Amino acid sequence: RQLTGLDDEVRNKVIRTPGIPPLIDALAGVVSGFLVGAPELPPRIAVGCAGGRHRSVVVANEVATRGWKLRGVSVRVRHRDIHQP
């Protein structure tokens, strides 16, 4: 359990989990919808899982790398619980 969602081994396993790719796509769609409504007020999105070190880290990072910069959107990711035991 020393590895986190920042490690390729964990990331690859999470990405291969059934349901995760559609979840990432859906969450990216939700974020996109918020941006259309009020681009000057960017949304704050929280992703959680049981421990906050594996699945949520991967999902948050994947959503954050979905081409937002090409649309002029600045993204900041903070993994609140990644250093918890």
Image (cartoon, helix red, strand yellow):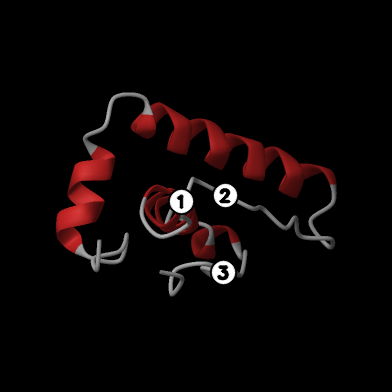
Q: Residue at x 44, y 51 (%)?
A: 66
How far is disc 1 from disc 3 in space, using C-alphas?
A: 10 Å
Q: Say which of 65 and 20 sits in front.
A: 20
Q: Amino acid at mark 3?
A: Arg
**Label 3 or label 2, whichever comes before in sequence order:** 2
Q: Residue at x 39, y 48 (%)?
A: 55
Regarding mark 3 in the picture, which secondary structure is present there? Answer: loop
Regarding mark 1 in the picture, which secondary structure is present there? Answer: helix
Q: Quadrant of the N terminus?
A: bottom left
Q: Position of residue 27 (x, y in %)?
A: 56, 38
Q: Residue at x 79, y 56 (%)?
A: 39
How far is disc 3 from disc 2 in space, using C-alphas?
A: 10 Å
Q: Amino acid at mark 2?
A: Val
Residue that numbered label 3 is attached to: 80
Q: Are marks 1 and 2 in contact (CB under 8 Å)?
A: yes
Q: Position of residue 25 (x, y in %)?
A: 46, 34
Q: Amino acid at mark 1?
A: Ser
Q: In terms of image quadrants, where is residue 4?
A: bottom left
Q: Residue furthest bottom?
A: 83
How far is disc 1 from disc 2 in space, using C-alphas?
A: 5 Å
